C-alpha cells in the first residue's frame, strides 16, 4: 500500500510538471475543457478497474459456491455499470 501511494504521488508530481510545460499558455476556457476531458478519462479508468476487480471477485465467489457474496457482488457490479 505504501509503495502504491508513493508511486501514485510520484506520478501526480510528474503530471503536474508536464501540465505546467504543456498547458502554460492556455486561457481559462481551454484549461476548463482540458480538465473536463482529463477528469472524464480518469473516471473511465477507475470504472474499468472497478469492473475488473468485481468480475474477478464474482468468479472467485462462484468457484467457492458463496451465494451470499455472489449476490452482493452482483449488486456492486450493477451499481458500477450504472455509473457514468
Image: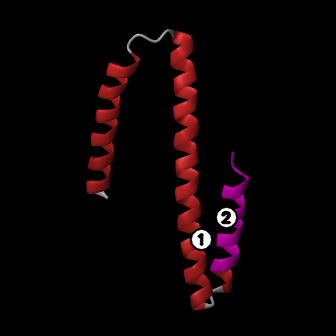
Q: Position of residue 9 (x, y in %)?
A: 30, 41
State whether residue 65 is above or below residue 53. below
Q: Residues within 10 Å of mark 1 (few under 14, many from 20)?
A: some
Q: Position of residue 63 (x, y in %)?
A: 58, 89
Q: Residue, x 69% and y 49% (percent of image)?
A: 83
Q: Which of 50/38 is in front?
A: 38
- Label 2 Cα crowd, 10 Å radius (few <14 / some 14-19 / many 20+): some
Q: Is 38 within the magenta?
A: no
Query: Where residue 18 sits: x, y (%)?
Result: 33, 27
Element class at badge 1: helix
Q: Secondary structure at mark 2?
A: helix
Which residue is pictured at 66% across the width and 64% down the height? 76
> Image quadrant of residue 36?
top right
For residue 77, the mark is 2
Disc 1 marks which residue?
Answer: 55
- First in sequence, mark 1 or 2: give its number: 1
Give me the residue at 29% from left, 34% from top.
14
Q: Is residue 78 left or right of residue 66?
A: right
The answer to whether the residues at label 1 and label 2 have Cβ atoms under 8 Å apart is: yes
* Residue 79 painted magenta: yes
Amino acid at each position: 500500500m505504501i509503495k502504491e501511494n508513493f508511486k501514485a504521488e510520484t506520478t501526480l508530481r510528474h503530471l503536474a510538471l508536464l501540465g505546467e510545460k504543456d498547458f502554460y499558455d492556455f486561457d481559462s476556457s481551454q484549461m476548463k475543457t482540458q480538465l473536463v476531458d482529463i477528469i472524464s478519462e480518469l473516471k473511465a479508468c477507475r470504472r474499468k478497474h472497478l469492473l475488473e476487480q468485481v468480475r474477478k471477485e464474482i468468479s472467485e465467489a462462484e468457484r467457492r459456491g458463496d451465494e451470499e457474496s455472489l449476490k452482493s457482488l452482483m449488486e456492486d457490479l450493477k451499481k458500477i455499470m450504472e455509473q457514468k
